Image: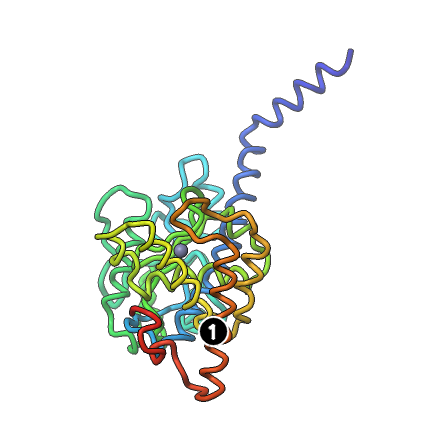
Amino acid sequence: MRWPLLFIAAVAGALSPLAGATAKAADIADLARQEARLAVAGWRLTTGSVRWCPVAEPQPGWILGDPRRFDARERAAAQQVYGTQGEAPFVAAVAPGSPADRAGLARGTEIAAIEGQPIPTLGPEPTIRIDAAIVMLAALEPAAPVAVTDTANRTYRLDAAPGCASAFRIEREGVQAAANGKLVRLRLSLAQSITDDAELAAVVAHELAHNILLHPARLADDRSIDRIRATELEADRLSVWLLADAGYDPFAAVRFWQRHKRPLIRAPTHPPTRERIAAITAEIATMTAARAANPAATPLELGGAFLF
Ligand SMILES: [Zn+2]
């Protein structure tokens, strides 16, 4: 009769704080890994297409984090993974070679101010401070250097790097992927399921295209099925140009949809996968022909093909 003892030991082990903390640390480490991938994709996509984006902003090449996004039981594990100590917002990920990286900002740098302006705390919400930082950055001159001050009062001078206007974030809950005009959000489980970096970039490019094309504003007054379907296909098509100008293979968007035969969102508002693949493939042909005639061709020159 030795099994009850083993059984009790196993249950006690599973419930011990140490075992719980270890599991949390692994989860948070994976969140940080996906944030690092998103930092690279977001930085490459926004800066690669800046010459034709209608609205630009400084792109430091970072993803911001906040300890408030982790509950009391997770806080210690989050501090361990990110290398933070205090309660301030922090740099969660940096794209290699980006202005943030070159200036010496790294995962765990705790941020106090941007251009000498303290990041405000406008409420108790977990992301309210990093949302404020996004708004502060978007208001700056796109092609000017940016000064960032950490909580130890050290100032980092980031080279100018204008990019298409958008910030990026990984969420542990909620919708798979979303764009609200200022921010692209990807769910952690979706990022984890896309192991190929170019295919991840294709999903980010689709959401970034929604922001560039002002789709959230255009859908605010008309959320009809036809309008939503039109914006979905328009974002699929613009993603091709974003991918190409960031140095990714635009066919990664086709490969993503072939791999995800079951649509991410099964709703009459969203085009079937085969329609998306056809629109993306046709746009790659359009872009290839346009750039054969003029290597500097942009989607802006396609006369009404996109409603910028
Ligand atoms: Zn979409």
Q: How many marks?
A: 1
Quadrant of the drawing holding the C terminus: bottom left
Q: Is residue 66 above or below residue 286?
A: above
The spot of residue 143 in percent (x, y) is 30, 78
Q: Is residue 34 visible?
A: yes
Left or right, 91 with respect to 284, comes to left
- Residue name at image x 52 percent, y 61 percent: 277
The residue carrying pointer 1 sits among few (fewer than 14), some (14 to 19) or many (20 or more) residues within 10 Å by Cα, namely many
The residue that disc 1 covers is 246
Under 8 Å from ligand 1: the CB of mark 1?
Answer: no
Name the quadrant containing residue 139.
Answer: bottom left
Q: Amino acid at mark 1?
A: Ala
Rendered view: 250 above or below 30: below
308 or 113: nearer the eye?
308
Return the x and y of residue 46 as percentages of the image width and height.
Answer: 39, 70
User: Image quarter for residue 141?
Assistant: bottom left
Quadrant location, ligand no. 1: bottom left
Task: Indicate whether 117 appears above or below 219.
Answer: below
**Closer to us: 45 or 162:** 45
Residue closer to the observer: 144 or 184? 184
The residue drawn where x is 31% and y is 62% is 153
The residue at 61%/22% (across/down) is: 12
Local SS, label 1: loop
Q: Is residue 89 above or below residue 239?
A: above
